[in-house]
Image (cartoon, grey):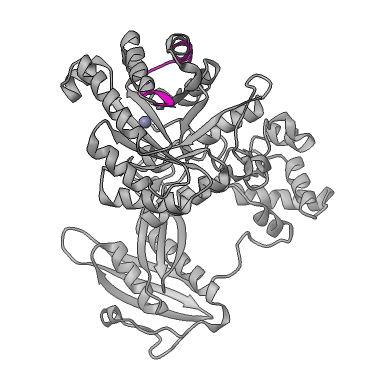
Amino acid sequence: MKRLLIFDTTLRDGEQSPGYGMTSEQKLQLARQLEALGVDIIEAGFPAASPADAAGVQTIAREVRGATIATLARCTENDIEASAKSLEKAARSRIHLFLSTSDLHLEHKLGIDRQTALDRIARATKLACRYCDEVEFSPEDATRTDIDFLLACAQAAVDEGARVINLPDTVGYSTPPEYRALFESIRLRLSGVERVILSAHCHNDLGMAVANSLAAVEGGAEQVECTINGIGERAGNASLEEIVMALHVRAGLLPYETGVVTQLLYPTSQMLSALTGVGVQPNKAVVGRNAFAHEAGVHQHGIMKDRRTYEIMTPESVGAPPMRLVLGRHSGRHAVALRLADLGYTISGTVLNLVYDRFLRACESGKSLTDDDLVLLAQDNPPTSSKPPYELSLVQASAGTVRPATATVRITRDGETYVACALGDGPVDAVCTCIDSITGHPARVVGYDLRAISEGRDAEGEVSLRVVVDDRPFSGRAVGTDIVEASARAYLSAVNKCLATMGEGVKPPQVPAVALRAQKAPLGAQP
Ligand SMILES: [Zn+2]
């Protein structure tokens, strides 16, 4: 088996795309996870882009010792020096130089001719070699560059000491046979190629980034550049987990190994989502919520007999939670009985018929049931989780062009009912203020996402939010056609989680200043 190097650029190409910005602390946390995951090279940032970027790279270079730390730099003295400075403390360092080489980019982006480009590449490579363990050069937009000129650029870099030549499909334009042929041709024609690692870097504009990366490997690439969850500019980069698992599952066809611990793929994907607040699409290969879920009746029947019928890799192999049989209205009586048997409830005959009737009723609204829900059905209980401290019983808000928005919220706890009214900057702010004044635990909302989960103006909206209470983070989620009410439920659910972690010693609510605008009932009662 040949060893393939995994170059992760989640913190550079990924982080620079909209919505994925991270703080230095978050970047360090992810870099440590990437090190544990077993990637060979971590591209930690673009130091010349901003002082914050430079500081982020510096911290990672100092703290993360198990991988080569790479930085991106244009072919200028200033960029190379900024990179060199950030990498000073790295256990192993790499400066990743790039310069556009396609005529389109040379003319319209850089305004230089081909000879000037060649001179810049040579000069920059020579300088960068003085400052780090290895230099990588990327002719940007390689797949749209005239191949003879592309070869000349690569040769200029190699002659000055570059040890990695990356051929990026910057705009996601290539197809697998074409990209493979590019690598075969450069491998054949580049002099000194035996000392050089060829690398693939693919964007997913036509959904072919992973296929192109694998084609490059077959064409002689020994390094692939990729990101966790495939995040990156526009449609993203090639996804690390998909490349690694394709090599793993199809080892017979693709005899290459990586240093990646596959069982950490799912946890790493989850960490990135948690840090950035951007979830993974449910049907995402390898790490999506549905990647190992089976709902169709026939599929469930098959998978229960032998998992291999509809499963080419196990969830355990990527560290995902065990196979999820999503039981919904398409599930048969047989599937329900078998799942319950797995969960320790062996039922048959009339009892099974009764439970199955309840099951179908519970699915009527289109809902899917979890294992916990199923157990409750078998026990003849409605499927609900344990009772939260506070329960929302009424939300009324008014908003519009006449400000401010107002809201009334009624909440129960231990049989007592509490009501609060508040003004706010919009109805969501107003209902959250009401909830704060009742619970006495004001939460700061640090992330708020609203997503339609069906079509139409009457679509159900899913609100997911992240809050900080007493310096600790909690999340809440709720679904409804009334997005203000869903927001209130999501917010209260986060506050309930906070109270649950405080356990018995929940401090009595202290009415915060904002409650001056609120009125509580019953008067004087404290939950
Ligand atoms: Zn890129």
Decide if residue 392 is on the left or right side of residue 511.
right
Decide if residue 468 is on the left or right side of residue 112.
right
Give the camera-side residue of 370 and 243. Answer: 243
Residue 176 place in picture, x, y as percent: 48, 15
Give the image quarter of residue 429: bottom left
Q: Is residue 498 above or below residue 453?
A: below
Residue 134 place in picture, x, y as percent: 42, 33
Residue 405 place in picture, x, y as percent: 23, 65
Q: Is residue 262 above or below residue 403?
A: above
Find out whether residue 178 is within the magenta segment: yes
Decide if residue 267 is on the left or right side of residue 91.
right
Give the image quarter of residue 206: top left
User: Which residue reaches farthest bottom?
Assistant: 524
> Magenta region: which residues?
162-184
The residue drawn where x is 59% and y is 45% is: 264
Give the camera-side residue of 332 and 166. Answer: 166
Give the camera-side residue of 406 and 478. Answer: 478
Ligand 1's image quarter is top left
In what quadrant of the picture does the N terminus appear?
top right
* Res. 389 visible in picture: no
Q: Is residue 482 above or below residue 35?
A: below
Q: Is residue 119 above or below residue 472?
A: above
Residue 195 place in picture, x, y as percent: 49, 21
Give the camera-side residue of 131 and 143. Answer: 131
Find out whether residue 300 is within the magenta segment: no
